[in-house]
């Protein structure tokens, strides 16, 4: 058998193994279905940023479209995400020697329900919390939108890892 035929045989075997064991994305995510849906992430926190629910919901959709083989569906999806924002708060985290605040922290907690219609053993409802620190000298209102975008990306990655990479 020639070297060229051996290379083709190994390539074909490798492709067969990748497609034979489910669906995999370039991120290493293992995906059980073909479609997904994301319900609107409601904000039930005591402090409400008006656009945060929409931002977070759209970040979920974009992440799953870009990093899995799943297609967005409005109903009857194989994989379903829903949830709510349950905490949105700021607090000082670093005090300088002169007793003034050096930095603040935006902390967000979301509760996400993941339903896998192909394998119910993978279903979960879990809280995810993360934070971003920012300088106390900055006007929070002027940087809030940027901070929300950053923390949304972090939280969506946390949920993605739990749902598809099994961290």
Image (tube, rainbow, N blue to C red):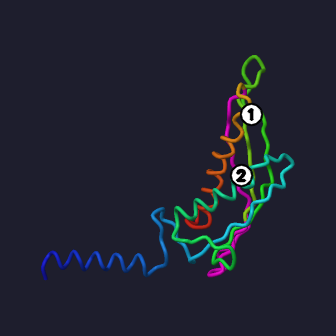
- In the rendered view, would you say 83 is above or below 33? above
Q: Which mark is residue 2?
A: none
Residue where numbered disc 1 is placed: 140
Residue at the spot 78% in from the left edge and 39% down from the top edge: 90
- Where residue 77 sits, quadrant-wise, is bottom right
- In the rendered view, would you say 81 is above or below 22? above
**Residue 47 place in picture, x, y as percent:** 84, 46
Residue where numbered disc 2 is placed: 129
Q: Determine whether the residue tagged by mark 2 lies in a helix, strand or loop.
A: strand
**Residue 19 place in picture, x, y as percent:** 42, 78
**Residue 157 place in picture, x, y as percent:** 60, 56
- Name the residue at the right extreme: 46
Residue at the spot 72% in from the left edge and 37% down from the top edge: 105
- Where residue 93 sits, quadrant-wise, is top right
Boundaries of the magenta span: 113-136
Q: Determine whether the residue tagged by mark 1 lies in a helix, strand or loop.
A: helix
Instruction: Say which label, 1 or 2, has the lower sequence index.
Output: 2
- In the image, taking residue 118 as reference, residue 7 lies left or right, namely left
**Quadrant in which the N terminus is drawn:** bottom left
- In the image, taking residue 141 as reference, residue 70 lies left or right, namely left
**Residue 43 place in picture, x, y as percent:** 80, 55
- Name the residue at the top extreme: 98
Mark 2 crowdedness (10 Å alpha carbons): few <14, some 14-19, many ≥20: some
Q: Is residue 117 magenta?
A: yes
C-alpha span from label 1 to label 2: 20 Å
- In the image, taking residue 57 as reference, residue 72 lies left or right, namely left
Q: Which of 92 and 19 is in front in this view?
A: 19
Q: Is residue 129 magenta?
A: yes
């Amino acid at each position: 058998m020639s070297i060229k035929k051996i290379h083709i045989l190994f390539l074909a075997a490798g492709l067969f193994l990748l497609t034979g064991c489910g669906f995999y994305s370039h991120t290493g995510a293992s995906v059980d279905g073909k479609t997904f849906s994301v319900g609107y992430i409601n904000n039930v926190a005591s402090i409400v940023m008006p656009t945060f629910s929409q931002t977070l919901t759209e970040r979920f959709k974009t992440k799953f479209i870009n990093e899995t083989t799943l297609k967005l569906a409005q109903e009857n999806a194989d994989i379903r995400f829903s949830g709510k924002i349950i905490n949105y708060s700021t607090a000082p985290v670093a005090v300088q020697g002169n007793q003034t605040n050096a930095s603040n922290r935006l902390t967000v907690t979301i509760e996400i329900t993941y339903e896998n219609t192909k394998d119910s053993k993978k279903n979960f409802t879990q809280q995810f919390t993360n934070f971003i620190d920012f300088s106390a000298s900055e006007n929070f209102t002027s940087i809030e939108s940027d901070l929300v975008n950053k923390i949304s990306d972090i939280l969506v990655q946390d949920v993605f890892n739990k749902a598809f990479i099994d961290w």
